Structure formats: structure tokens, C-alpha cells
Amino acid sequence: MSDLDTTPAQRVARYVFIAALALLGLWMLRRFVPALCWGVVLAIATTSLYDRWLARFHTKRRHVWAASSFTAFVAIVLIAPLVYAAVLAASEAFSLIRSLVESARNGPPELPQWLQQLPGAQEWVRGMWYDTFSRGGAATSALVHARPSASVVQLTREVGSQIVRRIATLGFALLTLFFVYLYRDQLRKDVPRVSRRLFGPTVEGLLHRAVGAIRAAVDGIVLVAVAEGAILGIVYALAGAGHPVLLGALTGVFAMVPFAAPLVFGVVALVLGFQGSVGGAVAVLVSGTLVLFVADHFVRPAIIGGAARLPFLWVLLGILGGIESFGLIGIFLGPALMAALMSVWRSWVTEIPPHDGTP
């Protein structure tokens, strides 16, 4: 039955029923919405790469083989750095605990020479250093005599639960990615068709603008962050910091969030300074600040704002507001939402004629 065969009241009731079904479905799948969003974002971000990959297959079931193999490739790219970082983090944690325990038993380590020469603060720094690492220091003494407690067990359980939840989210995101790849051609036809039926023909522009904003966000955030992590990883290696690959990867992850990368290279510079490498610490601080300034003020706004036609202020607000509202996935959803809103604004400005007497 078409819209011409129904009364206005029936059409309203039908759309209310459709909206209720959609809301009920979203409520039912609320635990899986982040994974679904990640799968869609990954599919949009890698669409050009997947086109080239799909062109290599010429068998009858080419879509199945291409989707499964490319999903496996994306999984390796995502999971391998996480496993590598987890192994190194665990190794570093055990090494740190062992060093603290040894300092509690054998006395504190040597205070760096440059800290001993700080004007007006030698006594305070020396006192803090020896109070922290001495035989009777609270932190190291607690490590030596620590026993499992209820709070530690509860903390371990909560951390394990969060890890399992993140792994499940990643698994469902990859599963979503596979099916989006598999039925991508059909989705390209169905989504605009349903959107036109619900909201009219003007909604296609909003969809294209939102998709373009997601691609631009991936290029401007992820790729730029990877470049920042790679550059600063080289700087860490030249400055003599330990595990420069892990630190570079961590810097790249933090660089996806505005103003978060200084937390990483600031800590690296601080550790280098404590180890006596003042020149390396200064080099890390200067290089990190310079790389971050160029990336955040020139490269990233040019990529995201140029492709999504968004001013830098709205790009920044979209990223920060998206993170605040949706979590990490908001890095990509925020600019997409701002691009859609900006598209609505521009369409209203250009389509609605001004009143008489207005410029």
C-alpha cells in the first residue's frame, strides 16, 4: 500500500510505529552500538583501499574472499600493536616493581647530578628522593610487604572485566566490518533510498557530507597521529629513551585526542632528565612541541576542514564534544555531526530568500 492510498492519520501512525521500532531496536542493541559504529567508521575510512583489494579477486565468490581477507588484514593491523604494547607494558611493570623492591632492600638509587644542582631546592629534592626510595619509604615498603587484599582482587577483577569488554567490542566491530564489506554495494543503494523515503531528497547531501567528514577525520586524525608518533619515535630513539617504538606508538594514540600528546613526550622528557640526559630531554620537549604545533594548527585543520568544509573551530569542537559524548568513537562521529549541521545551515541560507529590505 503506497502513501497515496493512506490517510494522513495513517501515515503519521505508520511513521510513529517505525520510530518506536527503531528506538526499541537501538535500546536492545545499546551494548553493541559502539562496536557497530566502529565497524561502520572503519568501513568508510578504508573504502578506497578495499576497492583496490576487491579488484584483485576475479572468482565467483570474490566478495566473500575479499571481505574476509581484508577484515583479517585490518584485524592484524589493529591487534598486533596492542599485543606488542601489552607485552612490553607487562615487562616494564615487572621491571619497575623489581627495581623498587631492590631499592627498598639495598638503599635508594643515586640522585641525578643535575637535580643535586638545582638552586635553592637541593635539600627538598634530596629529602623527597630518599623518603621515596629509602628502606623505610612507604611506597617501596608496601611493595616489599604487600599481600593480596580484597581491594587488589576487586581492582584486578574490574580491570579484567574492562579488558574482556574491549576485546568483545573489537570482535563485534570486526564482524560488523566484514558484513559491511560483504554487502557494501547493496548498502550504497538501500541507505540513500530509505533516507529519501523518510526525509526527502535533500537528505542525500547530508549523508554525503557526513561520510566525507568521517573520511576526513580518519585522514586528519589517525594518519596525522601515526605520522606524529613515527616522527617522535625517531626522536625518542635519538635521545636515548628506552623502548622508542612503544613510546612512539603511545604518542600516536594520544595524538588522536587534542592536547593529549604532550602527556607522553613530557613524561619521556622527565624520565630522560632524571636519568641525567638533560640534552635529550630538551630535544624531546622542543621536537614534540614543534611537531604538535605544526600538526594541530596547519596539517590537521587543512585536511579535515578542507574535505568536510568545516572551519577549524567547528572541527575542534566536534572532536572534543564527540569524545565527551560518545567516547573514543566520538573523534570521528563529532566532525561528521558538525558537517551535517553545517550542511543544513548552508542549505537554509542559500535556499530561503531574505526578507524584503534585508541585504
Image (cartoon, rainbow, N blue to C red):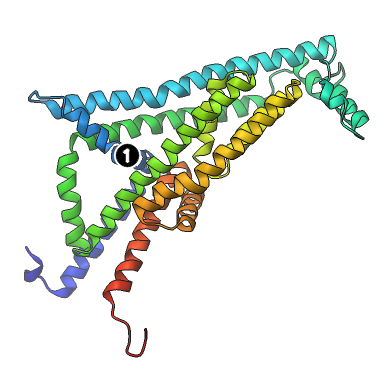
Task: Indicate the position of residue 218 as horizontal and vertical percent values.
Answer: 38, 41
Asked which quadrant contains residue 250, the reply is top right
Q: Does residue 239 appear to the left or right of 142 in the view shown?
A: left
Q: Secondary structure at mark 1?
A: helix
Q: Residue at x 31, y 49 (%)?
A: 212
Can residue 31 be seen by looking at this rendering? no
The residue that appears at 18% across and 38% down in the rendered structure is: 183
Image quarter for residue 184? top left
Asked if residue 6 shows in the view, the reply is yes
From the image, tell me which residue sits under label 1: 45
Residue at image point 63% right, 24% down: 153
The number of discs equals 1
Q: Where residue 249 appears, x then y in whole percent? A: 51, 27
Residue at image point 16% right, 70% down:
10
Q: Residues within 10 Å of mark 1 (few under 14, many from 20)?
A: many
Which residue type does callout 1 highlight? Ala
Examine the image and state in which quarter residue 41 appears: top left
> Quarter holding the N terminus?
bottom left
Q: Quadrant of the C terminus?
A: bottom left
Q: Is residue 244 left or right of residue 216?
A: right
Name the spot of residue 337 as percent of width and height, x first.
38, 55
